[in-house]
Amino acid sequence: MGGSSGSSPCASCKLLRRRCSKDCIFAPYFPPHDPHKFAIVHKVFGASNISKMLQELPVNQRGDAVSSLVYEANARVRDPVYGCAGTISYLQNQLSQLQLQLAAAQAEVLTMQMHQKPHLAEQESEMSFLMAGDDFNSISHYIAVASNLSATVMEDPLTR
Amino acid sequence: MSSFSRCAACKYLRRKCPQDCILAPYFPSSNPQRFVCVHKIFGASNVTKMLQQVPGHLRAEAAECISYEAIARVQDPVYGCVGIITQLQQQISQIHSEIMKTKGEMIAHHCAHSQHHPPPQPQGDPSWSISLHQQQQDYSQSDEHLLRKY
């Protein structure tokens, strides 16, 4: 797949205006028909940094690495301040909110189950209803989870 | 900044740290590892260009995010930040499924409860059947409310 004197140079060598050798490290991942792909990663990371990063990886992982570098470079060009970190922050907030929603919904299901129990207990003895302590404990557990999650939402999403 | 208090960037690059060094506010000498990661992934000149392109009041946040991305890439050389994004998207998708499942349980419980409290049986009076129809409509509207709640 590498370029040679007889075939078209890869997008990297075209942009860098150099000869595209047969073992060019960029050639498999930056074909000549997509010059924008290399242009953007070169702008953000620099060709020599990308070359070093790829050299440190096994060949079978380089394709994925290039894809993720292109993604990050695009994110950084679109949003020069926050880049990919902004996307992560947004998703972490979304996840926290959904966890709260799930805890609330599960607590409501347990509450509904508890309200149904008195109806069934009309046909059973009063003692068996009082013995159904597990549901009370489950509701307390879910309310505690919801309270805990509301505290964690305030954490800095970039803190790792 | 004098040569006795160079920023982490200028220390690493073994150069004098000028008073107006653009990197100095964001790469203090107290945290040299942060600039090492940034330099490895982006390079000093790229980081300088990126910060120059951003308004002054946003440079601290930009430097923070650039550092975060560089550290993520050093820790995961194949996927970097994209690995974290993929993980979060999967977790969100999972939670969505659990919420839908829980909503289904809520509807099922609500329907089961309405079956245990059936509406009064009509005693030959047509007006009772109208009342029954109205109650069934009321229950289905509250089911929609439960679906919309979350």
Image (cartoon, rainbow, N blue to C red):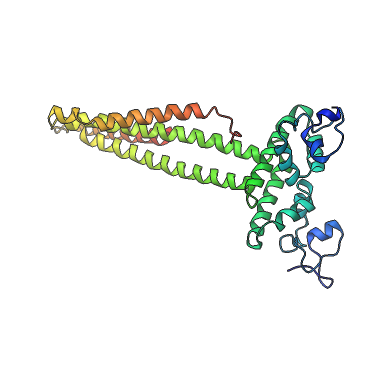
Give the percent coordinates (x, y) of residue A50. 74, 53
The image shows residue A145, relative to residue B79, as above or below, that is: above
The quarter of the picture where the C terminus of chain B appears is top left
Query: Could you say which quadrant of the image residue B139 lies in?
Result: top left
> In this orientation, which residue lies closer to the viewer: B18 or A16?
B18
> In this orientation, which residue lies closer to the viewer: B72 or B100?
B72
The image shows residue A57, relative to residue A150, as above or below, that is: below
Query: Could you say which quadrant of the image residue A113 lies in?
Result: top left
The quarter of the picture where the N terminus of chain B appears is top right
Residue B127 visible, this angle: no
Q: Residue furthest front?
A: B4
- A35 left or right, relative to A93: right
Residue A126 visible, this angle: yes
Give the percent coordinates (x, y) of residue B47. 78, 40
Give the percent coordinates (x, y) of residue B91. 50, 43
Q: How many marks?
A: 0
Residue located 21% across and 35% down the image: B116
The image shows residue A7, relative to residue A101, as above or below, that is: below
> In this orientation, which residue lies closer to the viewer: A45 or B114?
A45
> In this orientation, which residue lies closer to the viewer: A117 or A63?
A63
Residue located 76% across and 46% down the image: A44
Query: Could you say which quadrant of the image residue A123 lies in?
Result: top left
